[in-house]
Amino acid sequence: MPWLLLLIAGLLEICWALGMKQSVGFTKLWPSVFTWLTMLISFWLLAVAMKSLPASTAYAVWTGIGVAGVAVVGAIWAGEGFSPAKLLCIGLIVAGSLGLKLLE
């Protein structure tokens, strides 16, 4: 169960990071509300998952999901594009996060 909570927390991290971009520095109301709500839920789920998981592993996986997810969604949805180097780096982040989970 803690891994599922951590996965959801990571997915919500993607949401709030992209919501932050859409809020334009928190100057737009609804994107700002969306960002704050998803941020609070994401942090709460991370904290709950950390009750059972090592902090270093949980935090690294949570940020890994967020970084890789924002890079992928940003490339597709925001038109930021992919390069071979960007794909390699995303792959390394995913591999590192999976490695931490497997070694726990």
Image (cartoon, rainbow, N blue to C red):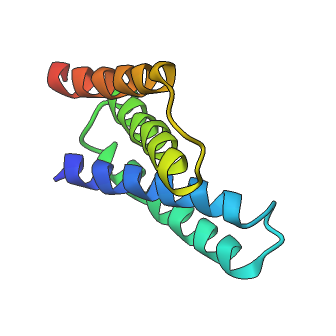
Instruction: Name the residue located 81 percent from the left edge and 60 percent from the top edge.
Output: 25
| Residue 24 screen position, x and y as percent | 79, 63
Q: Is residue 26 left or right of residue 19?
A: right
Q: Is residue 21 left or right of residue 79?
A: right
Instruction: Name the residue located 45 percent from the left edge and 43 percent from the top edge.
Output: 72
Q: Quadrant of the C terminus?
A: top left
Residue 46 lies, with reference to residue 36, above or below; the image says above
Q: Could one spot residue 69 in this view of the protein?
A: yes
| Residue 91 screen position, x and y as percent | 35, 24
Residue 42 occupies quadrant: bottom left
Residue lying furthest bottom: 30
Instruction: Name the residue located 32 percent from the left edge and 57 percent from the top edge.
Output: 8
The foreground one among 76 and 98 is 76
Q: Is residue 58 left or right of residue 69?
A: left
| Residue 23 screen position, x and y as percent | 73, 67
Residue 38 lies, with reference to residue 63, above or below; the image says below
Residue 20 occupies quadrant: bottom right
Report the number of numbered marks.
0
Instruction: Name the residue located 62 percent from the left edge and 67 percent from the top edge.
Output: 36
Residue 55 lies, with reference to residue 76, above or below; the image says above
| Residue 52 screen position, x and y as percent | 24, 42
Q: Could one spot residue 43 in this view of the protein?
A: no
